[in-house]
């Protein structure tokens, strides 16, 4: 039987201090690349479409990561409720800000409501 895993809030996970500047620099590099390709006035046949798709996906991943960094828990507020995969969840500790989910979950979307 798989064991349960405790999920800590973002503040306890430890986001590297230089992550935001690195993500922003990556987005600026991608923007410069997109602009350079646009200025070359290339036809779609001259641009590897799979490569462009991967670059757009990379940019979207950077945006999502930047958004996640900004989602800090509100100061001086405790969790009031938790949902896991859109289902009401009761196995959480508001004081410690921990949510326990079964280890059998491959992926989980967890929302902590303050």
Image (tube, grey):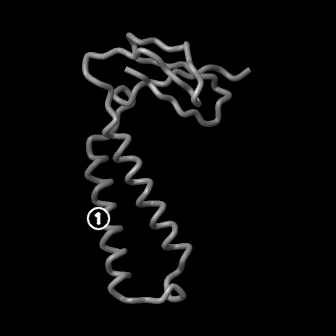
Q: Nearer the viewer, residue 63 or 81?
A: 81
Residue 54 locus on image (x, y percent)? 51, 66
Q: Provide the residue designation for mark 1.
A: 28
Q: Nearer the viewer, residue 3 or 68?
A: 68
Residue 32 locus on image (x, y percent)? 30, 73
* Residue 26 quadrant: bottom left
* Residue 89 quadrant: top right
* Residue 104 quadrant: top right
* Residue at the (32%, 31%) spot, across then down: 72
Residue 39, placed above or below residue 25: below
Decide if residue 75 is on the left or right side of residue 62.
left
Residue 83, placed above or below residue 24: above
Residue 2 locus on image (x, y percent)? 69, 23
Total tally of numbered discs in the picture = 1
Decide if residue 84 is on the left or right side of residue 94.
right
* Residue at the (33%, 54%) spot, across then down: 23
Where the C terminus falls, by quadrant? top left
Residue 4 locus on image (x, y percent)? 61, 20
Residue 42, placed above or below residue 106: below
**Kind of element beneath mark 1:** helix
Where the N terminus falls, by quadrant? top right
Decide if residue 47 is on the left or right side of residue 37.
right
Circle 1 Cα neighbour tier, 10 Å, few/some/many (<14 / 14–19 / ≥20): few
* Residue at the (26%, 16%) spot, across then down: 76
Q: Nearer the viewer, residue 87 or 64?
A: 87
Decide if residue 2 is on the left or right side of residue 86.
right
* Residue at the (55%, 13%) spot, across then down: 90
Residue 28, placed above or below residue 20: below
């Amino acid at each position: 039987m798989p064991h349960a895993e405790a999920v800590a809030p973002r503040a306890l996970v430890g986001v590297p201090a230089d992550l935001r500047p690195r993500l922003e620099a990556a987005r600026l590099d991608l923007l410069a690349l997109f602009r350079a390709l646009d200025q070359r006035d290339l036809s779609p046949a001259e641009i590897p479409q799979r490569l462009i798709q991967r670059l757009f996906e990379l940019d979207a991943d950077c945006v999502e990561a930047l958004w996640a960094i900004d989602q800090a828990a509100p100061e001086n507020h405790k969790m009031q409720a938790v949902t896991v995969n859109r289902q009401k969840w009761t196995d959480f500790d508001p004081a410690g800000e921990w949510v326990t989910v079964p280890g059998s979950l491959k992926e989980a979307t967890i929302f902590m409501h303050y």
